[in-house]
Image: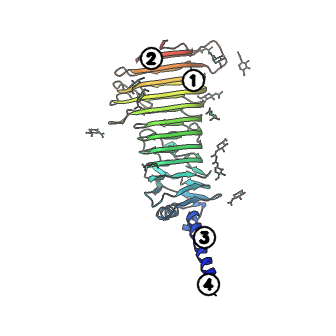
Amino acid sequence: MACSTMTLKAFLFSFILMCLWKSSFEQEIFNPLAYEAEGDGVTDDSQALVDAWDSACEHHAPAIFLIPENTTFLSGPASFEGPCRVTPTVQIRGTLKAIDSLSAFHDPGWIEFKHLDDLHIDGGGTFDGQGSRSWSHACSYCKKLPMSLRLLKVSNTTVSNLTFVDSKGFHISVQMSSSINVNRLNITAPGNSPNTDGIHISESNDVKISDLHISTGDDCISIGQGATDVHIENIICGPGHGISIGSLGKYENESDVSGVHVRNCSISDTTNGVRIKTWPGSPPSQAFNFTFQDIVMDNVSNPIIIDQQYCPDAKCVAPPSQVKISNVTYNRIRGTSNEQVAVSLLCSQSVPCENVILQDINLTMASNITSNATLSTCSNVVNGSAVGTQTPDPCLTKV
Ligand SMILES: *[C@@H]1O[C@H](CO)[C@@H](O)[C@H](O)[C@H]1NC(C)=O
Ligand SMILES: *[C@@H]1O[C@H](CO)[C@@H](O)[C@H](O)[C@H]1NC(C)=O
Ligand SMILES: *[C@@H]1O[C@H](CO)[C@@H](O)[C@H](O)[C@H]1NC(C)=O
Ligand SMILES: *[C@@H]1O[C@H](CO)[C@@H](O)[C@H](O)[C@H]1NC(C)=O
Ligand SMILES: *[C@@H]1O[C@H](CO)[C@@H](O)[C@H](O)[C@H]1NC(C)=O
Ligand SMILES: *[C@@H]1O[C@H](CO)[C@@H](O)[C@H](O)[C@H]1NC(C)=O
Ligand SMILES: *[C@@H]1O[C@H](CO)[C@@H](O)[C@H](O)[C@H]1NC(C)=O
Ligand SMILES: *[C@@H]1O[C@H](CO)[C@@H](O)[C@H](O)[C@H]1NC(C)=O
Ligand SMILES: *[C@@H]1O[C@H](CO)[C@@H](O)[C@H](O)[C@H]1NC(C)=O
Ligand SMILES: *[C@@H]1O[C@H](CO)[C@@H](O)[C@H](O)[C@H]1NC(C)=O
Ligand SMILES: *[C@@H]1O[C@H](CO)[C@@H](O)[C@H](O)[C@H]1NC(C)=O
Ligand SMILES: *[C@@H]1O[C@H](CO)[C@@H](O)[C@H](O)[C@H]1NC(C)=O
C-alpha cells in the first residue's frame, strides 16, 4: 500500500517535471492566422499581423512570430515594436505583400521593426513591395517612398535567408542600430525602378553584409551619414548603380562615415562600380578609412569613382563640397568598363582627398575593340599613390 502510493507520487512528480521541461523548450508560435488574418493576399491583414506580434512580444518565454509557408498576407504599414519581454524569433516562410496604393502609407517604412535587441529574422520567405505603380511618383523632390523593411534602433540583429522584390522605396534600411548581420538575401527590382536601393545603412555601427544577390534600379548598397565599421562581402550586384558611400553632405550636421570595407564582390552592367559621392556646397564632415578589394567589374560605366560634385537633378553652381575624404584603398580591382574613363577621382577643391591608394588595378574596355584604352582622371588628390600593376595608366604617382 505504502509502496504503491510512493510509486504514484513519484510517477506524478516526474510527469510534472517532464511537462515543465517540455514547455520550457517548446517555443510557442504566434501566427497571424490565429488573429483573424485571412492570409489570402487580398484582404488587408495589417491589424492581425500587429496583433500577433504584440502577443508574441508580451509572451513570457521565447516565442516564434511565424508567417507560415504558402500563405500571403496583404499589408499596409505594420510596425513591430519592442522592447519585448523576450524578443520573439521572426520566421517569414510565406509572403508579405504590400498594399499597392501609396495613399495607405504615411511612415517611411512598410514593415518596421524598432526598439529591439537580439532580433532574428529569417525563414526563406518573401517581401513583395509591389512598387511598380508607385515608381512613376518617385523623384528627388517628392516624398520618399516606403522602404520594405526598416530596422530602427535595433541591436544584435540578424536578417537572413529571405527574398525581396519590387520595393516602393529602398528594399532595406538600417538606421540608428548596432551589431547587425545581413546575409543570404536575394533582392530584385527592375533596372529602371527609381530609388529602389538594395540596402541603405545610416547612423549605425558594426554592420556586416554578406552573400547577397542584388539587381535593382539604384544603389545595390548605399552607406549614408553616421555609418561606422561596415563590412560588405560576397555581393553579386547588377543591374543597378553599384556600391556607394553616400551621398554625403546634403544636410547640416551630418555625422562622419568611417571604416567601410568592401571585398570579394562582383559588379555587372551597372552605372557605377564602387563610388564615393558627396554633394557640392555641403557642410563639413569626414569620410575615411575605406577599403575596396577583390572586386570584379563587368561592363560597368564608372568602375572606380569619387564624385564630390554629385548633383543628379540640377545644375550645380554651389561652392565645393566640404566632406573631407581620406585613407581610401582600392586593391585588386579588375574587369571591364563600358566608358573610357574607368578611374575617376574628382575630389573637392576646398578639402582635397588625402591618402588614396590604387593597388593592382586592371580595368579594360568592355567592348572587344582594342583601339580605345581606358583612362584615369584625378583632381584635388594629395598624398595619392599607385602601387603594382595599373591599367589604365594611373593619374596618381606611381611608387
Ligand atoms: C506548400 O506548397 C508546396 C507546393 O504546393 C507543398 O509541397 C508544401 O507541402 C506546402 N507546405 C505547407 C506547409 O503546406
Ligand atoms: C532558408 O529557409 C528555408 C525555409 O525555411 C529552409 O528550408 C532553408 O534551409 C533555409 N536556408 C538556409 C541557408 O538557412
Ligand atoms: C548586444 O549583445 C551583447 C552581448 O550579448 C550585449 O552585451 C549588449 O548589451 C547587446 N547590445 C544592446 C544594445 O543591447
Ligand atoms: C537566391 O538565389 C540563389 C541563386 O538563384 C539561390 O541559390 C538561393 O537559394 C536564393 N536565396 C533565397 C533566400 O531565396
Ligand atoms: C566570393 O563571393 C562569391 C560569390 O558571392 C562566393 O561564391 C565565394 O565563395 C566568395 N569567395 C571568398 C573567398 O569569400
Ligand atoms: C546643427 O547643429 C547646430 C549646433 O548644434 C544647431 O544649432 C542647428 O540647429 C543644427 N542644424 C540642423 C539642421 O539640425
Ligand atoms: C552594359 O551595361 C549597360 C548599362 O550600363 C547595358 O545597357 C548593356 O546592355 C550592357 N551590355 C551588355 C553586353 O550586357
Ligand atoms: C582609421 O585607420 C587608421 C589607420 O589604419 C587607424 O589608426 C584609425 O584608428 C582608424 N580610425 C577609425 C575611426 O577607425
Ligand atoms: C589615416 O591613416 C593614417 C595612418 O595610415 C592615420 O595616421 C590617420 O589617423 C588616418 N586618418 C584618419 C582620419 O583616420
Ligand atoms: C588584365 O585583364 C586583361 C583582360 O581580362 C588580361 O588579358 C590581362 O592579362 C590582365 N593584365 C594583368 C596584368 O593581369
Ligand atoms: C568581338 O566580339 C564579337 C562577338 O563576340 C566577335 O564576333 C568579333 O569577332 C569580336 N571582334 C574582335 C575584334 O575581337
Ligand atoms: C573611342 O573613344 C571615343 C571617346 O569616348 C569615341 O568617340 C570613339 O568612338 C571610340 N572609338 C572606338 C573605335 O570605339
Residue 198 shows in the view: yes
* Chain-order first, disc 1 or disc 2: 1
Say which mark, if any, is on residue 384: 2
User: How much space separates mark 2 and mark 3, taking CA atoms?
Assistant: 69 Å
User: How much space separates mark 1 and mark 2, taking CA atoms?
Assistant: 17 Å
Q: Are marks 3 and 4 in contact (CB under 8 Å)?
A: no
Q: Amino acid at mark 1?
A: Ile
Which of 13 and 182 lies nearest the eye of the viewer?
13
Marks 4, 2: nearer the viewer: 4
* Chain-order first, disc 2 or disc 3: 3
Q: Where ligand 4 lies, by quadrant? A: top right
User: How much space separates mark 3 and mark 4, taking CA atoms?
Assistant: 20 Å
Task: Please give the residue where the numbered disc 3 appears in the rendered image.
Answer: 18
Is 172 left or right of 256, judged from the image as shown? right
> Circle 4 — which element?
helix
User: How much space separates mark 4 and mark 1, taking CA atoms?
Assistant: 79 Å
Marks 4, 1: nearer the viewer: 4
Looking at the image, which residue sits at the far bottom?
1
Q: Is residue 368 above or below residue 267?
A: above
Q: Which residue is drawn at the image coordinates 50% and 31% (left, top)?
A: 261
Say which mark, if any, is on residue 5: 4
> Circle 1 — which element?
strand
Q: Which residue is drawn at the image coordinates 35% and 24% (left, top)?
A: 320
Which of 205 and 305 lies nearest the eye of the viewer?
205
Is 37 left or right of 250, judged from the image as shown? right
